[in-house]
Image: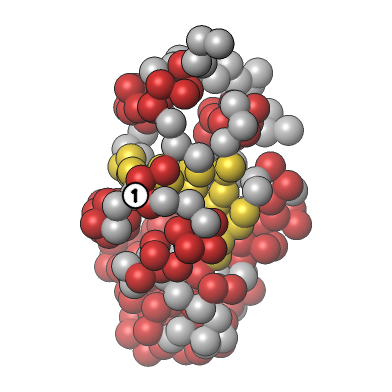
Amino acid sequence: MEKTRFEKRRVDVVLFDFGGVLAEEGWKNGFTAIAAASGLDGEGLVSAATDAVYASGYITGKGTRSDFWRLLREKTGLQGEADLLWREIFARFVLRAPMMGWVKKLKAEGLVVGILSDQIDMLDALDARDNFFSEFDHVFNSYHLGKGKRDASLFDDLAGFLKTEPGRILFIDDAPGNVERARQKGWNAILYRNAETFDSDMAEFFGTAPPAVAGKGDCS
């Protein structure tokens, strides 16, 4: 029987980063908005928040949300009620319909599809809002794993958990460092830059056209 186009360059598992790939980057966009409203430098606050979420241990479930806010306030002088600031970030994580279209298409072709994200417990709250975990076979979140993508051994751990050879896994992320670490561990990896280049990258990798998406706001 003739192979499908997906089988011409076969992988068994495709893992997607969440913020900046499957969804708009709510962390960066949220803190940029918070900075503008607070009279702070946007890039500086985003950088400080990212450092604080790792330094506090919150990103790997070893610290608390309070630890994160305390450290960030010490570093930046940021003011404001934590719950209100949190909502600024939460609201800006919006699923990208074309990316969810890719998820559905890959699953329909029989591939295992998952999320691999350095995220806090907000990811669980986002699923409660948008109900997207059900679209995936696996959700790997640093908050629950106790380890993030900055630790290259995570890629070995997950290949073992999936019982899949590294060369049969494809990983998509918008952070060059994460892509490089995955490749160093033998994974295939695509650096997500924007929707147009991603479609081209996937078409080249799999030899297939991008999926049809009913509408930009339809992720059902």
Q: Residue at x 60, y 20 (%)?
A: 213
Tell me: residue 8, above or below residue 40. above
- Measuring from the top left, give residue 193's x and y in whole percent: 32, 38
As drawn, 104 above or below 17: above
- Closest to the observer, 46 or 132: 132
Give the vertical position of 14 relative to 47 (above or below).
above
Which residue extends farthest front? 1
Of all residues, the one furthest to the top in this rendering is 2
Q: Residues within 10 Å of mark 1 (few under 14, many from 20)?
A: many
Residue at x-position 34% and y-position 80%: 76
Q: Quadrant of the C terminus?
A: top right
Q: Nearer the viewer, residue 187 or 74?
A: 187
What element does badge 1 sit on? loop
Q: Which residue is mark 1?
A: 187
Q: Amino acid at mark 1?
A: Trp
Render colour scheme: secondary structure
Answer with left or right where residue 136 lies relative to residue 68.
right
Q: Position of residue 187 (x, y in %)?
A: 34, 49
For the N terminus, give its image quadrant.
Answer: top right
Residue, x 29% and y 58% (percent of image)? Answer: 185
- Whether residue 40 can be seen here: no
Where does the image place residue 82, in percent across and percent down from the top left? 58, 77
Q: Is residue 13 visible?
A: yes
For image coordinates 56% across by 31% down, the residue present is 106
Tally of numbered tags: 1
The image shows residue 134 at horizontal and vertical percentages of 73, 47
| Residue 214 appears left or right of 160 | right
